[in-house]
Amino acid sequence: MSQEITGYCAEALKSLTPSQVEFLQKLPKAELHAHLNGSIPLHLLQELANEYYQASSNDRTATVLPEVVRSGIQTLQDGIQLSDCHEFFALFPAIYALTSNPPALRRAARAVLEHFLSDSDGHPQAAYLELRSTPRETAAMTRRQYVETVLDEVEQYPPERAALIVSLDRRMDAGAAAECIECAISLRNAGRRIVGVDLCGEIKAGNMADFEQHFRRAKEAGLKVTLHIAEVAESPEDETLLLLSFKPDRLGHATYLNEAAKKIVHTYEIPIELCLSSNLITKTVPTLDAHHIRYYLGHNHPIAICTDDILPFRNSLLGEYALLMAQPPLGLGLTEAEIEKVAKMGMECRFL
Ligand code: 6MZ
């Protein structure tokens, strides 16, 4: 079942001719910034929610109140309206309640991989997917079981099509962060398909100095590092420079970099994962015209166009590329040659 697309992507897609859409569909595209629990197709979320409602009356171990889950899922079904980026993170406890045991997580991972990689509509959304997810410890699984469950699904696809990035949440304490890194390293050393680690989560949470040791350890062990960085105007400049000192291999968003940070990013040619709809819907960027993609395109800097969270944003990778192609104000009005170059840059930024 294909996911319903609404909002900016839908408008951009509607404005294109069938041959333009076909051009975008045929373009080999890499999806390098998709959060598993933010990318669950809506039809599966509804299924998991119905099962959760049936089971929740007997469940004494539930950590999230059923009313919180019900209202969160309802919001996702109705379509979200955010007044700022911080409201966005409040959606996740409800989703997490539905993917808190291995069978449900397995179904979620399978559906997300299928969404991006199956070519049931003639063309897959992505030629290659680097899926990312935050290992969670629940009453039903350890963090290691979480990662193994997701990996089992990722590895159903050949290595040139899918890999996993293990995310650290900024809210994690030192013990949890260390456990995630050790888990990523040991599974990778055992031949499992983990290509990197990520830093994500509530933008203002955590002290990033505490995370330095974990990312250094991951790099020493041969894992690549991507970091969500400077997502909002209030992101502290010293924090941004500290994160850059971890020597990341890619950056997520990088919306508000000051001159010193931009200099580092250019000197080391650190590719940027850009999520256009996500930034517009969470209001970290006011308009497409003001989006920092223009700056990076103008500087011929490596970028990858990504979706972030198709569940709340109701976007798609094809729709994000439609935003590149549609004429202003619906899109950026790039030529086919320019879009082809962007897609190629995305493929070249893979961690694999
Ligand atoms: C920062 C984000 C995010 O890991 O449980 N996440 N973190 N910025 C964003 N953009 C607006 N979108 C999602 O997927 C869900 C988790 O990804 C992070 C949040 O920590 C969220 O809880 P996983 O699979």
Image (spheres, helix red, strand yellow):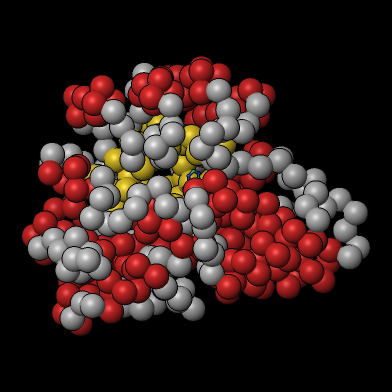
Q: Position of residue 196 (x, y in %)?
A: 43, 36
Q: Which residue sits furthest bottom?
A: 18
Q: Is residue 168 visible?
A: no
Image coords of residue 39 (percent x, y): 50, 59
The residue drawn where x is 73% and y is 73% is 50
Nearest the eye: 81 or 210: 81
Q: Is residue 193 visible?
A: yes
x, y percent for residue 201: 54, 40
Depth order, front residue of 155/260: 260
Towards the viewer: 186 or 260: 260
Percent x, y of residue 119: 36, 72
- What residue do we see at 29% from left, 40% from top? 272
Residue that appears at 48% across and 34% down: 199
Position of 343 compared to 166: left or right? Answer: left
Q: Is residue 333 left or right of residue 321?
A: left
Q: Quadrant of residue 47?
A: bottom right
Give 156 or 20, whichever is nearer the viewer. Answer: 20
Q: Does residue 85 lie above or below 266 as drawn?
A: below
